[in-house]
Image (cartoon, rainbow, N blue to C red):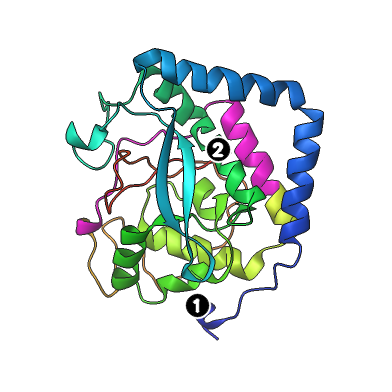
Amino acid sequence: MNQQDRPPKNPGYKTWFDLSVLAVAHVVLFPLWVVLWTMIPLGIWLADRGPVFFRQERVGKNGQVFTILKFRTMIPNADKAGPAWTTEGDPRITPVGRILRRTALDELPGLISIWRGHMSFVGPRALDRNEQRQLEELIPGFEKRLQIRPGLTGLAQVYDKNDDPYEKFRFDMEYLERQNVFLDARLLLQSVLNTLVARWDRRSGKVSLENFTAGGAKSPLGGLDTAEPEIPIQDDAHQDSHSSESGNPNDRNSTLG
């Protein structure tokens, strides 16, 4: 049976796993949370007196749309000052924003979506509605990613080094087939390590969907959409590229470690 046709494993552990991690982390690291939730918003506001949060609608489990919060990392109205995606050395990213992106702390408000049951710690990345639609048209079966709740981090977020949508899809389908508590814990630990050493958001810019051919024959980066990946647990971790904070169809932002 083709990997795309296999039903995902029953992620019955997700709710208790997510809530347990949230509860334990907030109790054990309470002073750290107070510092983060105080200093980050203050730093963003003092930098340009602009809004602290960036809101965007994302597609979740079974296609349900929800609103995700992120700490703002670009100048206000960034979409009016440049392209809809982040470029190398993008001047629209604020000094505070660069730190947040490298550490993925801009994703911290996404914990609210986990408390509300819209997301999990680990799972496929939640995409903007237009980007989800575009990729469904580009890659057959792409909607199968939506069989489970999206995650702040995940197999594709950690190991997709080139922001290739075909690679992303293969990693997501691999995760749906192999998801379990131990894999989630391992990806969470790897993500925390990426945050501690500021290893997120190290790419030069956004891969444009216009560079890819519909029908899934082959991506410009050489990936075939018929291959089945294996989980490269020992590889160096990388993270999804950021987009401008505009709500544009090509928007994409960092993923929390």
Can you identify the residue that label 2 sits on? Answer: 109
- Dividing the image into 4 quarters, which one contains the C terminus? top right
First-in-chain label (1 vs 2)? 1
Per the image, label 2 sits on a secondary structure element best described as: helix
SS for callout 1:
helix
Q: Nearer the viewer, residue 100 or 155?
A: 100
Q: On the image, which quarter does residue 93 sit in?
A: top left
Q: Is residue 28 magenta?
A: no
Question: Is disc 1 surrounded by few (<14), some (14 to 19) or many (20+) residues within 10 Å?
Answer: many
Instruction: Evaluate whether residue 153 shows in this view.
Output: no
**Residue at left 42%, top 13%?**
46
User: Identity of the amino acid at label 1?
Assistant: Gln
Outermost top residue? 46
**Residue with the most extreme bottom position:** 1
Q: Which residues are magenta?
A: 186-210
In front: label 1 or label 2: 2
Residue 4 at x, y percent in the picture: 50, 77
Indicate the quadrant where residue 112 lies.
top right
Q: Which residue is mark 1?
A: 4
Quadrant containing the N terminus is bottom right
Rendered image: mark on residue 43? none
Q: Position of residue 238 (x, y in %)?
A: 48, 41
Q: Nearer the viewer, residue 206 or 25?
A: 25
Image quadrant in which you'd find residue 8 = bottom right
As shown in the figure, which amino acid type bears the numbered disc 2? Pro
